[in-house]
Image (spheres, grey):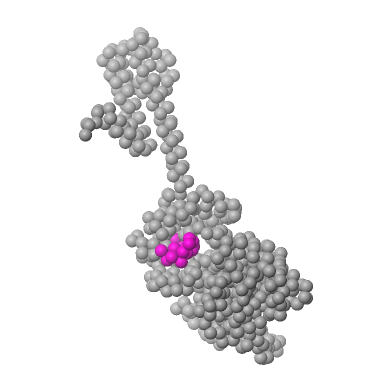
Amino acid sequence: MKTPTFKQRFQYWFDNYMSRGTGALIGGLAVLSLVIILIAAAVIRFGALAMDGESAPSFGEAAWMSLMRTLDAGTMGGDTGPGFRIVMLLVTIGGIFIVSTLIGILSNGLEERIEQLRKGRSLVLENDHTLILGWTPQVFTIISELVAANLSRKNGAVIVVLADQDKVEMEDAIKERIPDTKNTRIICRSGNPIDMNDLEIASPHTARSIIVLSEGSDPDTHVIKTVLAITNNPNRRSQPYHIVTQIRDPHNMDVLKLLSEKDTVQPILTTDLIARVVAQTSRQSGLSVVYTELMNFGGDEIYFKQEPALIGKTYGDALLAYETCAVMGIRRADGSVFLNPAMDTRIEAGDSIFAIAEDDDKIHLLTSRLTLEETLIQHAGNDAKPKSERGLILGWNRSGSVIIRELDNYVAKGSELLVVSEVDDLEGQIRRDVGRLKNQKLKVMKGDIRSRELLDELGVTEYDHVIVLAYSHLDVQEADAITLVALLHLRDIAERDETPFSIISEMLDLRNRELAEAAKVDDFIVSEHLISLMLAQLSENAALKDVFADLFDPEGAEV
């Protein structure tokens, strides 16, 4: 092997040194400047060089004169004496080279630093912030809700978003969709939430709550891995984490329950939630609007409050103890929730009431007890025997089987349900997922729900309620377009035959909401929007999970 030459070795050393960064380059220029100054000072001192009419300066004075000419080229304008001028000219030329190079290095270093910041890899040093892991269209709704929730915080709040996306693109998208973030600061960082090293960038150990979004081709697996990266982190905190997320497959709920032993992990089973909302809305028109109002931070919300003055009194007394809010139930000291319990239920020490109010500062006890005119109370129950119903489901997605099971808990025996969809082998799939129905007779038919001819043949006006589901295997916009076409036909049929029937539709994109309203649909449910609202609510108050669970349970209290 040929031995490298001195030139090659020097070139190799120089290349490595140049690649060490801005600090090393500035240090090299400083050393070069010092060498030039010392050499010039030595030549002037030992060569006895001086300006005309002056004695030769000392070594220190010569060094100072060289330094001044290195920094300012105009200083040599007053130099005299041929030898002295030549030396100072060389020093000035060296100084021009060094200063110009320094400016270039500083400029490049600043650009590199800005570029590093644009990459979003710098460490977040925040406390008590809300951390959002992942990037989906849900992030805009969640941030909007958290901004509204943070208005009551006097010192403001911070939301940190960590996702495998470009930092600048995330910031631009958020600014476009949410131009005014009030007293909330939004910080975006680029990184993979599954990677523990990337996760450290967002400071999860100081966050008050963490929202894990489901993304990718296998969203449930992504969620589980992200939660594991948080809870099994070697640098984890001793206090429990408050993690809110969503799961599609009910079989994966058991995995997250195992992770809830040390931490508060609250998964939302999305198919179950949407199915229950759809089923209940089909029973009461307008219920979707009520649920949306309950779950957003724009209007009245659910608040918990301990009232020592109510200890020993009954739930019935608590209902009449407030004027500016509506009491919903009792939360025991052990965390158990009772929505609309029996009127004689006693409120004990450590219990809290939870109520719907405009704000938490609006929950005040009345100074005097309200008088109840019992003679004005009228029985609102219906003693008539429930009648069988006919239901129609158009379209299909993973929530369909759960909707059928939920409807079976509400309808009378002998009711009929027809499912029309373009999905192949749907009947076998439904039979496997749903099992035996106790109150409904199920029929499945294949067809294009956009076809006016098909809808006329079905005689949709003969059904008590029609549910239109968005196809989950299609693109979001394509699925919503099919839903909108079906809605337009259904509304036209209802107006033509002058036979109103309830229509409940599921939308995937919130931006298509206005189009659905233009179709005059009775109730529409934007599934991703509703899930986003619940994620935001639970991130702010973990106790709401049991309240919502009871509210959507067929055997629990309902609106």
Answer above or below: position of 169 versus 543. Answer: above
Which image quadrant is residue 299 in? bottom right
Q: Which residue is drawn at 42% across and 74% down?
A: 254
Point out residue 144 in the picture as x, y percentages from the top left corner.
Answer: 57, 59
Quadrant where the N terminus sits is: top left
Nearest the eye: 313 or 499: 499
Point out residue 528 in the picture as x, y percentages from the top left corner.
Answer: 56, 65
Answer above or below: position of 228 versus 444. Answer: above
The stretch in magenta equals 207-225
Q: In the shown orientation, is residue 140 left or right of residue 262? A: right
Q: In the shown orientation, is residue 213 left or right of residue 393? A: left
Point out residue 445 in the picture as x, y percentages from the top left corner.
Answer: 62, 76
Q: Residue at x 65, y 88 (%)?
A: 386
Nearest the eye: 82 or 310: 82
Which image quadrant is residue 479 in? bottom right
Which image quadrant is residue 56 in? top left
Quadrant where the C terminus sits is: bottom right
Total number of numbered discs in the rendering: 0
Residue 221 located within the stretch drawn in magenta: yes
Q: Which residue is drawn at 52% across and 50% down?
A: 169
Q: Does any portion of residue 283 appear in the rendered image?
A: no
Point out residue 388 in the picture as x, y percentages from the top left corner.
Answer: 65, 86
Residue 454 located within the stretch drawn in magenta: no
Q: Does any portion of residue 34 appear in the rendered image?
A: yes
Q: Which residue is drawn at 39% across and 65% down?
A: 228
Answer above or below: position of 514 versus 436. Answer: above
Answer above or below: position of 538 versus 16. Answer: below
